[in-house]
Image: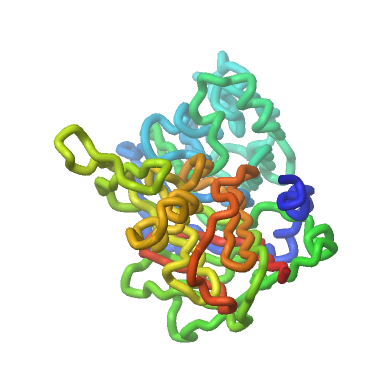
Amino acid sequence: MKKYLLPLIPLLAAGQAFAQARPLFNGKDLTGWKGEGYVVEDGAIVATPKARNLVTEDTFANYVLEFDFQLTPGANNGLGINYPGEGDAAYTGLELQILDDTAEKYKDLKDAQSHGSIYLLAAAKRGSLKPVGEWNHQKVTVTRSSVVVVVNGTEILRRDLDDLSLRNRKHKGAQRIAGHIAFLGHGDKVSFKNINIEEMPLDANIEGVKAAGFTRIFDGKGLTGWKHDPKTTNWAAVNGILKHNGKAAEIKDLWTEKEYGDFQIAFDWRWTGRGNKKAQPVVLPDGNHKVGPDGKPVTEEIEEMDSGIYLRGSTKAQVNLWNWSVGSGEVYGYRMDKSQPEEVRAGVTPKVKMDRPQGEWNRMMITMKGDVLTVLLNGRKVIEQAQLPGIPAKGPIGLQHHGQAIEFANIWVKEL
């Protein structure tokens, strides 16, 4: 197994080469956000007495968020990170306090309740806020394993999230590493403007990958090397991340210009939007659908997310990225082909579900040699030596799309 994973395991800040911030707030309206009790005044988002949670429509992982904020006397708000979009963000995600901690009514605050603190979990240094009424600037860096908060040029918090998770096993938010961003109102007037985010993909050891014989097929800047309609806007390159916006009217697959025979492809991917609730079949290890005592298919309701990787130009040979019960890595076209031998259908059915929670990055490696397929997902073989009878000997690689927002990064190929 190590020989497959070695090229991508060592970590290096690869995404920094593409770093470029983009606005999360257009200064005019709340496009891209959901919530009530917030208004836009003079180019700023303002929390009214009715303000509670204002949540981004998209989810984020590995980013730098910067914004300006203005407090009123005694005002209380919060910044939600890694928030699933449901429940109390201080517990289902993490809440960074936004608070006039100089107010007399907060004189008895706990250490982990001051401005910039991770609410009740990690204390920030006090004394960085400007006088109430002035604009402050805050920079928050969130990665898989850490959060750093800088206010007006002073670092007030640096916390290892892996350690935080271990120390707070019962805190659901401390176990998360991706999610929505939110402003968490408490009925006080607080204003926000100049809200920008700089997203980055998972780190990858570029030199190690190159030394192992891999070639980058997504340069992080554009769609060079991929067949695409230049008029469509559904696919876009942002800071080393290949994004699909999930808009159904613009669903198009991407195909490499180059064709491949035997190859390995390694890449990262994650869901960034939401799907529709659907009842889908429960898939058994042999590739068949589970049926009940009445002979009818057993289903489970899921928030369906669906994409995949086409191999050698074949839409039948699609390694699925999805959240059905069987997990990603499954080859639907072969599993559902009842004319295929039982061992073929069972072979393309994942042996274990290794998908990370929605919104988190997954790392996959696909090996195609002859008509034999192996798929690793997050360090485990989910498909091993599965046969794909009739697959073309050569063809392009495709990124398939079904209408949910998805991101790809660190896409590398090695010809065998």
Q: Nearer the viewer, residue 193 or 215?
A: 215
In this orientation, which residue lies closer to the viewer: 94 or 224? 224
Say if residue 42 shows up in the picture.
no
User: Looking at the rendering, which quadrant does residue 232 occupy?
Assistant: bottom left
Q: Measuring from the top left, give residue 113's x and y in whole percent.
A: 56, 23
Query: Residue placed at 42% from the left, 42% from the top?
Result: 285
Please state, as top left, top right, bottom left or bottom right, where the C terminus lies in the image. bottom right
- Counting from the top left corner in percent of width and height, residue 293 is at 18, 32
- Is residue 235 shown above or below 119? below
Q: Residue at x 70, y 32 (%)?
A: 160
Residue drawn 47% across the image and 64% down it: 318
Tell me the colour scheme of the image.
Answer: rainbow
Depicted 159 relative to depicted 218: above or below: above
Q: How many marks?
A: 0
Q: Where the N terminus falls, by quadrant?
A: top right
Q: Residue furthest front?
A: 341
User: Which residue is at the front of the view, 400 or 89?
Assistant: 400
Which residue reaches farthest bottom? 230
Q: Quadrant of residue 27?
A: bottom left
Nearer to the camera, 282 or 51: 282
Q: Is residue 381 left or right of residue 95?
A: right
Farthest residue in the top direction?
108
* Residue 234 in sight here: yes
Q: Position of residue 233 (x, y in %)?
A: 45, 76
Q: Residue at x 53, y 76 (%)?
A: 392
